[in-house]
Image (spheres, grey):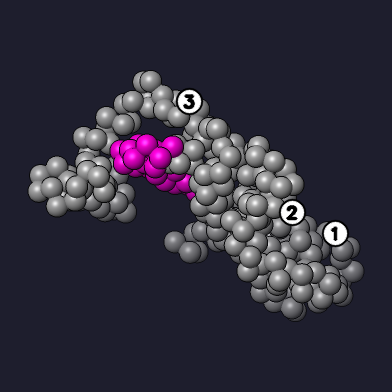
Amino acid sequence: MIGRRAQIGLATVAAVGVLWWLLTSVTGIVGSARFPSPAEFWVSLHQILSRGYAGAGLAQHALHSLKLVAMGFAVAIATGIPLGLWMGWDRRVEALVNPIFLVVRPIPPLAWIPLAILWLGLGDAAKIMVIWFAAFVPSVINAFAGVRNIDRPVIEAARMLGTPRWRMVREIIAPAAAPMIFTGLRLSLQASWTTLVAAELVGALVGLGFILNMAQQDIYPGMILVGMVAVGILGWATTWLLGQAERRALAWNVAARD
């Protein structure tokens, strides 16, 4: 049985599809040079699925982009969450690290592309570095905020009972900060996909961003839309998987929120 939210979502998608068809195929208000019609989109999709485009099929492009996002995202959460927890827990660490973080934080991830290429070349390592930075910042901020939102009496009571430092972090600090940490993970994942496309516009030989770059040079709106839709679907799928992980890890918080 489809839930009410799913029904509303499907109805919205259907309405957008009908409007797209009317504006492009029926009335011609939007010309094909500016935005492809549904028929042109399906032709482009069939081409990349059957014969490939930009040197590879859609699956190969998508898997390569997914690999870059997964690696950059994994490195970001492995470094960002511990740093955020540490800064929130120890004010001396915050005093030492926060001034540097406040300077680096406003720099757009794309501004790191020239340095990443200079340091790591045009390969995947440079793209992973840019994705890492984009996902790193939200994970640090939200982990830090999660620790600072913990009621101080809880921490003081644990200290009075002589709770060892690492046990306190594992059993009190991390679980209490987990809702904010997952919020940061969602933001980090979104930032990873947004940055991936821009990173693959430079020096890539395969990937969804490379599809967009080649289709723009070929003046091929249908293929541009195929690349955009692929990014959107993969972004939605990975976000859904992260949501399922959150539901399992924080069932009590999800139930209260719903």
Q: Nearer the viewer, mark 1 or mark 3?
A: 3
Q: Residue reaching furthest left?
A: 27
Residue at horizontal 63 percent and vertical 52 percent from the top:
113
Question: Which circle's residue, 2 or 1, is located before the other in the chain?
Answer: 2
Say which amino acid is labelled 2: Thr
Specify few, some or many for label 2: CA neighbours under 10 Å numbering under 14, 14-19, or 20 or more. Answer: some
Res 148 → quadrant = bottom right
Specify few, some or many for label 1: CA neighbours under 10 Å numbering under 14, 14-19, or 20 or more. Answer: few
- From the image, tell me which residue sits under label 2: 79
Residue 228 lies, with reference to residue 61, above or below; the image says below
Q: Write the start and end of the magenta stretch as one range.
A: 214-240
Q: Specify whether 65 is left or right of 230.
A: right
Label 3: element kind: loop
Specify few, some or many for label 3: CA neighbours under 10 Å numbering under 14, 14-19, or 20 or more. Answer: some
Return the residue nearer the eye: 104 or 247: 104
Residue at horizontal 55 percent and vertical 58 percent from the top:
187
Residue at horizontal 66 percent and vertical 74 percent from the top:
149
Question: Which circle's residue, 2 or 3, is located before the other in the chain?
Answer: 3
- Decide whether residue 216 is among the magenta residues: yes
- From the image, tell me which residue sits under label 3: 55
Say which amino acid is labelled 1: Trp
Res 68 → quadrant = top right
- From the image, tell me which residue sits under label 1: 166
Residue at horizontal 26 percent and vertical 48 percent from the top:
34
Image location (x, y in percent) of residue 56: 47, 25
